[in-house]
Image (tube, grey):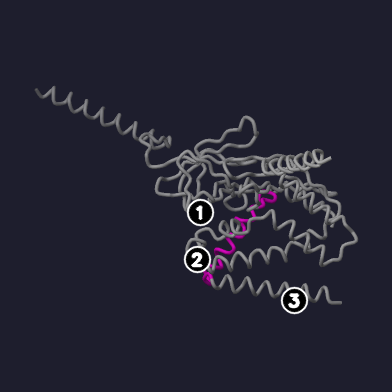
């Protein structure tokens, strides 16, 4: 009887330990198991240089989502970016998504400035208004040598 | 004789009709190109008086822009809370400001070349990518256009990845937050009279 109790305790301990372990790996891996709390919108940029998957999406500096996928558009050779945005945040049709840099040499993130249109972007829809990543070095070298 | 006359009339009618439908079905890139060509033609007419030239230039350019759409996008959330009168006043002030600010730049045009690269249409909106080639640099400019009736009208200009609308959205948004909508209107009309005075002084001597 006593030995059975010990075995049950060990079993329970193992199961709980395993549950903790899987919870930890889901949390650390940033895996969204259940979903439903957010939706995705797509946006095309002519350059996303420096932007990484997992980078944050911000409105007024507040994180409202993240960059879930970046890939190259087949025909246009533009960057297609998929943004995952919290469900509570509505994006108007004329919102503008821009790629910005945190500080001077910081990470790139996507900043959205909300618009005033009555129409909202549906889940899975496309954010048409975008500003691409600015290549500061390129700009400087371009205008340094411009003759006035 | 009667027959040939009638035939000719019918023929011209058909040709006219065909040409109007051709204009109507033109894409955003073609329409933008037509405006640029028209502006170039005015600029190259050297024997025009300054005032006449300026009027014809602004007429040609303004026809391609949609200032109501542009204003709505710039004011964003503030557009919703503004009443009809305030909206009208803003659109009028803003288009005047733009005209006064930029017409001088267009008149100063010399021999830059404008290349039309491509158009991208999505629903009733389009982006037309162009490059201005000067002697030393190439400046990418993308025009965002919206389909209104048969025309594509510009509502945003993106230069070197910097959006005109987004730029004004943040700076005007700050002003509205600090001084209210009427404060913004007051500052805009102040700026406008300032520009008018400058222009007056410049043309007088």
Q: Residues within 10 Å of mark 2 (few under 14, many from 20)?
A: some
Query: Circles 3 and 2: CB distance less than 8 Å?
Result: no
Mark 1 vs mark 2, CA separation in Å: 13 Å
Q: How many marks?
A: 3
Mark drawn on residue B82? 2
Image location of residue A28, percent across then percent down: 41, 37
At x 59% / y 74%, what residue is drawn?
Answer: B186
Q: Chain of mark 2?
A: B
Element carrying mark 1: loop
Magenta part of the protein: which range?
B157-181
Q: Chain of mark 1?
A: A
Q: Is residue B191 left or right of residue B86?
A: right
Q: Secondary structure at mark 3?
A: helix
What residue do we see at 56% from left, 36% from top? A70
Q: CA distance from mark 3 to mark 2?
A: 29 Å
Which of disc 2 and disc 3 is earlier in sequence? 2
Q: Quadrant location of residue A35?
A: top left
Distance, label 3 to label 1, CA atoms, is: 36 Å
Give me the chain letter of mark 3.
B
Q: Which residue is mark 1?
A: A117
Q: Nearer the viewer, residue B152 or A145?
A: B152
The one nearer the camera, B183 or B44, is B44
Whether the magenta-drawn stretch holds residue B174 is answered as yes
Q: Is residue B65 above or below residue A11?
A: below
Q: Which mark is residue B197?
A: 3
């Amino acid at each position: 009887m006593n030995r059975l109790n010990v075995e049950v305790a060990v079993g329970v301990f193992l199961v709980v330990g395993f549950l903790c372990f899987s919870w930890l790996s889901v949390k650390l891996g940033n895996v969204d198991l259940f979903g439903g709390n957010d939706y995705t919108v797509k946006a095309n940029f002519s350059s996303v240089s420096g932007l990484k998957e997992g980078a944050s999406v911000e409105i007024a500096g507040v994180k409202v989502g993240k960059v879930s996928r970046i890939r190259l558009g087949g025909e246009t050779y533009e960057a297609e970016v998929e943004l995952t945005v919290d469900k509570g945040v509505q994006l108007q049709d004329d919102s503008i998504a821009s790629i910005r840099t945190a500080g001077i040499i910081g990470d790139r993130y996507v900043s959205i400035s909300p618009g005033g249109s009555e129409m909202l972007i549906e889940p899975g829809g496309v954010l048409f208004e975008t500003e691409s990543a600015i290549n500061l070095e390129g700009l400087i070298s371009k205008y340094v040598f411009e003759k006035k | 004789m009667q027959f040939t006359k009638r035939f000719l009339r019918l023929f011209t009618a058909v040709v006219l009709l065909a040409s109007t439908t051709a204009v109507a079905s033109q894409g955003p890139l073609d329409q933008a190109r037509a405006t640029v060509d028209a502006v170039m033609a005015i600029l190259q007419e050297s024997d025009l008086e300054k005032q006449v030239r300026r009027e014809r230039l602004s007429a040609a350019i303004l026809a391609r822009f949609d200032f109501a759409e542009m204003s709505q996008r710039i004011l964003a959330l503030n557009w919703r809370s503004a009443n009809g009168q305030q909206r009208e006043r803003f659109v009028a002030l803003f288009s005047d400001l733009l005209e006064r600010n930029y017409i001088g730049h267009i008149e100063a045009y010399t021999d830059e070349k404008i290349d039309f690269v491509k158009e991208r249409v999505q629903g009733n909106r389009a982006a037309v990518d162009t490059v201005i080639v000067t002697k030393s640099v190439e400046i990418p400019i993308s025009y965002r256009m919206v389909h209104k009736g048969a025309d594509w009208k510009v509502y945003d200009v993106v230069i070197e990845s910097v959006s005109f609308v987004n730029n004004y959205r943040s700076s005007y948004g700050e002003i509205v937050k600090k001084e209210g909508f009427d404060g913004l209107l007051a500052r805009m009309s102040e700026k406008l009279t300032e520009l008018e005075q400058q222009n007056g002084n410049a043309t007088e001597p």
